Image (cartoon, rainbow, N blue to C red):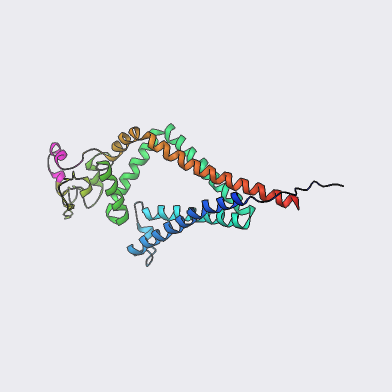
Amino acid sequence: MYYYRYDSAEVSCCYKYLMFSYNIIFWLAGAAFIAVGFWAWSEKGVLLDLTQVTRLHGFDPVWLVLVVGGVTFILGFAGCVGALRENICLLKFFSGIIGFIFILELTAAVLAVVFQSQVREWINDFFLANIKAYRDDIDLQNLIDSVQRMNHCCGAQEPDDWNLNDYFSCNGTHRSREKCGVPFSCCISDPADSVVNTQCGYDVRNRPNRDWSNSIYTKGCIAALEDWLPGNLYTVAIVFIVISLLQMVGIYLARTLISDIEKVKFSY
């Protein structure tokens, strides 16, 4: 009985070290994200009292940082070690997870286009829930302020959405100095001001509605996002294409390495 032997079968060093280089960046980036996430939690005292995680009613941005960092770190580790050790299991794990993430992205994009009204309603409810929890977490507060400043908007649909927050609500008998106001990020800033006036939104909603536009943004952030998207559609598409290409390159390198390793094993 004769067996065909692949005398020249070998694992390509080019693909092997390309795969390693590709993943070492993500591995280090994942480690950096995790470090930043835990640093943010330590600054808020969460690491000293983990029950704070369950008491937050809004969205904690640190969770997103930790999840992205954790997934990136694990994938980077699997890709690096799988390439250096020529481990088929790790390489299959890497390519499988990357492929799964790619399919999830495509599915999310299609669903967002098909169910636009439901997505808009979900984003609106999500924004309102986090307005309510605005003062509960400093990272959430900074995130909402950034969204409102960058998009020149206030609230989800209108400035009166801030009635949902206990500190800014016009209702009730609370004595908050921010009563019937809005956060400073809703204010129309003066380019000449070198210092941010964090009290510019005080008592704004006590004035007649027609006077609001003189000092604060009156457009809701959902409407601002809808106005921003059509004008930046090409930018969004380019970002999506670049991310997809990076994922496909990773899958290609992993599958090529797997094929080379299997050929070498078969030749022996």
Question: Closest to the observer: 241 or 5?
Answer: 5
Compared across the picture, whether 116 is left or right of 165 comes to right
Where residue 122 sits: x, y (%)? 37, 40
Where residue 85 sits: x, y (%)? 62, 58
Where residue 185 sits: x, y (%)? 23, 48
Compared across the picture, whether 105 is left or right of 159 comes to right
Residue 75 visible somewhere in the drawing: no
Q: Residue at image x 38%, y 37%?
A: 235
* Range drawn in magenta: 204-217
73 inside magenta stretch: no
Q: Residue furthest right?
A: 1
Prevailing SS of the magenta stretch: helix
- Total labels: the figure holds 0
Where residue 181 sits: x, y (%)? 18, 48
Question: Closest to the observer: 19 or 200?
Answer: 19
Say if 202 sits above or below 43 in the image: above
Q: Residue furthest bottom?
A: 48
Q: Residue at image x 32%, y 55%?
A: 139
Question: Closest to the observer: 74 or 192?
Answer: 192
